[in-house]
Image (cartoon, helix red, strand yellow):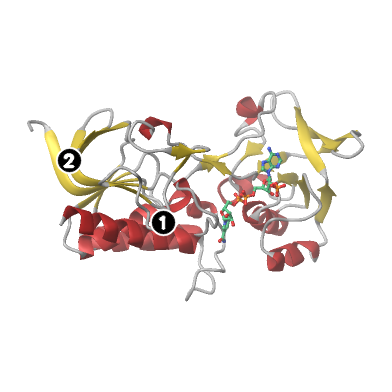
Amino acid sequence: MAGVQSVDILIIGGGTAGLTAAIYAVRAGKSALILEAKAYGGQIVNTPDIENYPGMAHVSGFDFATGLYEQAIGLGAKLKYEKALSIEDNGKTKLVKTRRHTYECKAVILATGAKNRTLGLDREEQFTGSGVSYCATCDGSFFKGKTVAVNGGGNTAIEDALYLSDICEKVYVIHRRDEFRGDAADVEKMRARDNIEFILNANVTALIGDQKVEAIEVTDKNTGEKREVKVDGLFIAVGQVPDNIAFENVVELSSGYIAAGEDCKTATPGIFTAGDCRTKNVRQLTTAAADGAVAALAACAYIK
Ligand code: NAP
């Protein structure tokens, strides 16, 4: 087809799952192209210190992602910074369109990950970059010696709180329950820090400030009591939401996630999915990498 570029396996998303899929695809002798809308690496680039990836006691998310990217490209995978806008399923081949190009492939692997969930507060968007952040490693240094709050109780919030407590004077951890969802070992580390104060069973209900965040309103879930907490910044770490609506014509979505089991096969022949974007119970770096391998090998078998 004129003007259409062809590839064996087209991977949508250049995070851990997508890059791992590319490694397995090219090592199996297939051509692989990754389309990535933002930056390679996905969510893990924002993690300051990974302690739970087998064989690596400590590695920064950025170093991990860069190593993975270089490994995939070194083995012959291609990556283009383009957002996949649609997939057309033509049976044996699929057409994937971006704003400027159309790609034809024999199999697609959807590895779109997930994006940050917002709190939906008034002026949350306006204050993003002026006191509101979703990434402690990206923005933490702007708050050196200052007072910040982290909202959330998962691994991201806990890691953010630990990271920020090293550079900020004080860190409030605000969580809607009194138990944390994140790793117990890291919760203990957080509890041992002198400059971390917990506000539990509470939600952030308003952002206060003129041009930037100067304080937040925190509401106790049980009593309804509201208090104003003076902070220079609020780090929101309340989880991720999938972003797969563009592909709902070719795959089934369940609460926004792509429906697939551990075999990473969707109900559509030739369309596979890997990583945080698919229905699964455990969303970890290890399971994203595992999915990448499973999806790529399934795609290779399908092409044969
Ligand atoms: P998460 O595990 O889904 O946790 C989200 C947290 O935000 C939960 O504590 C949740 O409270 C809270 N929350 C959700 N919606 C909220 C709202 N509207 N208002 C207030 N609080 C809200 O998300 P995550 O921490 O970003 O982690 C995502 C995945 O990546 C997880 O599987 C995590 O283990 C993984 N991860 C792994 C690593 C690592 O391996 N080193 C690092 C970071 C993340 P409840 O607990 O009450 O539901």
Type of the residue with mark 1: Thr
Number of callouts: 2
Q: Using the image, determine if residue 57 lies above or below residue 160.
A: below
Task: Name which residue lies at 56% across and 43% down.
Answer: 240
Task: Say which quadrant the C terminus sits in.
Answer: bottom left
Nearest the eye: 59 or 152: 152
In this view, the mark in front (2 or 1) = 2
Any mark on residue 16, and which?
A: 1
Residue 258, image x, y percentages: 43, 43
Q: Residues within 10 Å of mark 2 (few under 14, many from 20)?
A: some
Q: Is mark 2 within 8 Å of ligand 1?
A: no
Residue 96, image x, y percentages: 25, 35
Nearest the eye: 202 or 213: 202
Q: Residues within 10 Å of mark 1 (few under 14, many from 20)?
A: many
* Left or right: 128, with 225 as reference point: left
Residue 175, image x, y percentages: 76, 47
Residue 131 visible to the viewer:
yes
Residue 164, image x, y percentages: 68, 54
Q: Is mark 1 within 8 Å of ligand 1?
A: no
Task: Name which residue lies at 83% across and 45% down.
Answer: 201
- Separation of marks 2 and 1 at Cα, in angstroms: 25 Å
Q: Give the labeled residue for mark 2.
A: 93
| Quadrant in the rendering for residue 235 | top right
* Left or right: 107, with 182 as reference point: left
Task: Name which residue lies at 81% across and 57% down.
Answer: 195
- In the rendered image, the residue lying farthest to the front is 267
Q: Using the image, determine if residue 260 lies above or below residue 214.
A: below
Describe the element under mark 1 as helix, strand or loop: helix
Describe the element under mark 2 as helix, strand or loop: strand
Task: Name which residue lies at 34% across and 44% down.
Answer: 267
Type of the residue with mark 2: Thr
